[in-house]
Structure formats: C-alpha cells, structure tokens
C-alpha cells in the first residue's frame, strides 16, 4: 500500500458529468443527421417521417447539441467560496 493514498477514493462527479454532456451532444448530432436524412428523401425507410416532423427533429437535435449542455453545466457549476 502506498503511503499517503486513500485506498478507496470517492469517484469524481466531474467524470460522470462530462460523459453525460458528451452523450447529449452526440445524441443531438445524431438527431440532426436523422432529420436531414428524412428531408433528403433518399432512404425509403425514412419516407414515413413527414417533412414537418423532420424539421422538428432537427430543431430538437440542435437544442440538444447547443442549449442543453450549457444549461446542465450551469446547473452543475460549483458554488463560489
């Protein structure tokens, strides 16, 4: 055992929060891609998505990519001392 080291350190919540932020950004990018593919009408399986819904998917994806991570980061910010 190394002197001065805690044998079972508490997990750092910043690691989990960073992973959540990156997962949100990835899901937002995938939603934008899905909406763009639905609008292109190049894939027959996506023809069931109406044009209005495709624009809504893109809007949700953009919000998921840009807005939600900022809101969560602000909420998780450490208090000033």
Image (cartoon, rainbow, N blue to C red):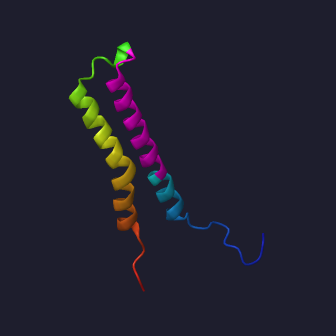
Q: Quadrant of residue 7?
A: bottom right
Q: Residue at x 78, y 72 (%)?
A: 2
Q: Is residue 55 left or right of residue 21?
A: left
Q: Residue at x 45, y 54 (%)?
A: 21
Could you tell me how many numbered marks the image carries? 0
Q: Is residue 69 left or right of residue 51?
A: right
Q: Residue furthest bottom?
A: 81
Magenta run includes residue 12: no
Q: Quadrant of residue 41?
A: top left
Q: Nearer the viewer, residue 6 or 63?
A: 63
Q: Residue at x 46, y 43 (%)?
A: 26
Q: Is residue 40 above or below residue 24?
A: above
Residue 72 place in picture, x, y as percent: 37, 60
Q: Is residue 69 above or below residue 28?
A: below
Does the magenta stretch mainly form a helix, a strand or a loop?
A: helix
Q: Which residues are magenta?
A: 22-43
Image quadrant where one finds the N terminus:
bottom right
Residue 12 place in picture, x, y as percent: 54, 65
Q: Is residue 28 left or right of residue 5?
A: left
Residue 13 place in picture, x, y as percent: 50, 63
Magenta run includes residue 23: yes
Q: Residue at x 42, y 74 (%)?
A: 78
Q: Is residue 9 above or below residue 47?
A: below
Q: Residue furthest top?
A: 44
Image quadrant where one finds the C terminus:
bottom left
Q: Residue furthest front?
A: 40
Residue 52 place in picture, x, y as percent: 21, 30
């Amino acid at each position: 055992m190394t002197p001065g080291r805690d044998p079972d350190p508490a997990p750092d919540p910043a690691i989990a929060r960073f992973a959540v932020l990156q997962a949100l950004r990835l899901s937002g990018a995938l939603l934008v891609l899905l909406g763009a593919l639905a609008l292109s009408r190049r894939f027959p399986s996506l023809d069931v998505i109406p044009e209005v819904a495709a624009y809504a998917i893109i809007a949700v994806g953009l919000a998921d990519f840009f807005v939600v991570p900022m809101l969560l980061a602000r909420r998780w910010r450490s208090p000033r001392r």
